Amino acid sequence: MRKTIRRCADAAGALGLAAALMGTAAPAQAAIAAPQTALQPMAYQSTTLWLPDGKRTATVWRTWYRNSDGRYHGRYGFTSASRGVSVYVVLWTSDKTKYLPTEGKTYSYSDESTVQLFACDNSYPNDEDCTATW
């Protein structure tokens, strides 16, 4: 199929060149769409999440691109976190939600509708305080 389209495009180009050399109008060409396989450029963001005490932080980042179906694909992680701070990610899809701890590594995700990063205070009584979110 690709060869056929290529030959048609080459033939239409040759006809246009011949018509230009002969001084007559070139026949109309059929539009040939570009393939949809080209990768979109990745977007990158990073931010510093501050815990409510105003002293401790976590620096998180994410990259992504969006497919034509509206889903996001990319990577996420964190570059630094204060002592007693954990970083979690929530991956949202239409049918499930995943809460995952991060450990400073790079993680990949695919087919997600939202990616949300949290910085959590490990020393919060009875549980973690995860109010710092991005």
Image (spheres, grey):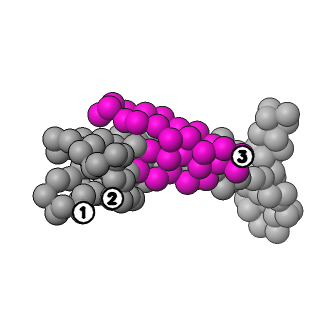
Q: Name the element at disc 1.
A: loop
In depth, the one of 70 and 68 nearer the eye is 70
Q: Describe the element under mark 3 as helix, strand or loop.
A: loop
For the residues marked 1 and 3, what is the alpha-carbon distance in whole angstroms?
Answer: 32 Å
First along the sequence among labels 1 and 2: 1
Residue found at x 59% / y 49%: 92
* Magenta region, main secondary structure: strand
Residue labelled with disc 3:
95
Q: Position of residue 42 (x, y in %)?
A: 45, 48
| Residue 118 shows in this picture | yes
Q: Which residue range is magenta in the image? A: 89-117
The residue identified by callout 1 is: 52
Q: Which residue is mark 2?
A: 132
- Asked whether 118 falls inside the magenta stretch, the response is no
Residue 95 magenta:
yes
Crowding near the residue tagged with mark 3, few <14, some 14–19, many ≥20 C-alpha atoms within 10 Å? few
Q: Nearer the viewer, mark 1 or mark 2?
A: 1
Residue 71 is tagged as none
Among numbered discs 3 and 2, the one appearing first in the sequence: 3
Residue at the (76%, 43%) spot, across then down: 10
